[in-house]
Image (cartoon, grey):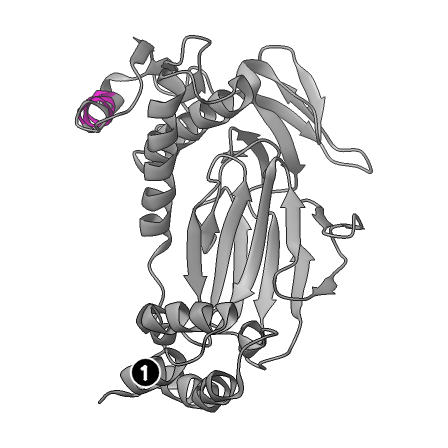
Amino acid sequence: MSVNNFINTGISKINSADATHAKAYLSNANDTFKHAGHYMLEVLDGVHAGSTYIQKTGTMTVGNSRENEVILFGANIAPRHFEITLHSGLFSQLQIRPLDAPVTLEDGSIVEVGQHANISTDETVTFGDTEIIISRIADPKSFIKPGIRAMAFICLLAMIPIIYGMAAGFLGTVAEAGSRMASTMQYGIERTSSKLLGTVSSASSQSIDEAFAWTVRVKLEDLKLNHKLRASPTADGSIRVYGNVSDAELPRWTSFLQWYDSTSNFPPLIRDVSRAKIGSNIPQIKSVWLDDNPSVFFKDGIVGSIGSNIKDGWKIVDINDASVMIERDGAVISLTY
């Protein structure tokens, strides 16, 4: 008789509701035991509500950039929004540290960039329009339930050290960020079908449309077209790609179209792309003034400093003695002079 069967047999003789719950828990425990000692992040609200992600102890970052362990889309979610340190101690608190934007804890307190806070497992964290909760899988504290009779209680506590010991030998590497992005995108696509049936709110629909646009921007970046083309959702749920490409970039644009056409469940694509000479839509520098407030003089007559918005949606993010850095839709271009 296996250990699980032995415990189930014993619990079945106890006539209490809590013991019945304990029996049900044990009968579905195999998956839980396999990940014992790991943490599970669950999205409670936002575009990806209902999604989960399992992470072993260590550090993970959350944001809308591909470089994060957990990639989430949504309003006001920063590229690398925050970092969480998951400790191996059974009763250790978690440490949360905002990287690009603040977060709000369960008690309403706000943790700003440059600060950090310790939180317990099963406490909610809110950022942008998203809310998550992080819990420990097979946490010993979750087994302490009032009303469970002595035999079930002792059996469970006796198994927990064994579970954590076995888990230590089976810690593997987590899935790549791309796989996680694919799973979250799949969830977003499922939400889109609900939107078409009229069961998703307007705000949620806008977030889902922006998630598709973000995926398109990532593909354009992979093809090195992100500095020439832009992507945005439209009011009717389509994705509009606009800008211009040179003759040399046409093969990459064709590759993008083939990728999009082969991707099922994506919204209709509005192709507002024209052909132009290389670099025609990239700001051209005329001169740079370096002092306490450095400035850039462009050939089209525009003058800008750090933080200025210039033509075609570009923004100046840095001016130094070697280059001028401009950013648009998460793409950063270095202009040398």
Q: In which quarter of the image is the N terminus?
A: bottom left
Residue in the foreground of this view, choosing between 263 and 40:
40
Q: Where is residue 151 in the image (x, y as percent from the top left)?
A: 47, 88
Quadrant for residue 195, please give it: top left
- Using residue 154 as the reference point, say whether residue 130 is left or right of it: right
> From the viewer's perspective, is 323 left or right of 152?
right
Q: How crowded is mark 1: few (under 14 residues within 10 Å), some or many (20 or more)?
A: few
Viewer can see residue 319 = yes
The segment highlighted magenta reads: 250-258
Question: Which residue shows up at 74% across the image and 35% down it?
Answer: 290
Location of residue 96 in the rendering, given as x and y in whole percent from the top left corner: 66, 61
- Magenta segment main secondary structure: helix
The x and y percentages for residue 276 are 33, 11
173 is within the stretch colored magenta: no
The residue that label 1 is drawn on is 9
Q: Toward which corner of the image does residue 83 lie, by quadrant?
A: bottom right
- Reply above or below: 288 against 195: below
Q: How many labels does the image show?
A: 1
Q: Which residue is rendered at x = 49% and y = 37% of the image?
A: 73
* Element class at badge 1: helix
**Whole-percent x and y of residue 101?**
68, 44
- 13 relative to 132, above or below: below
**On screen, 62 above or below 335?**
below
Identity, as a three-letter code, of the amino acid under mark 1: Thr
Question: Magenta includes 255?
Answer: yes
Q: In this view, does 193 lie to the left or right of 286?
A: left
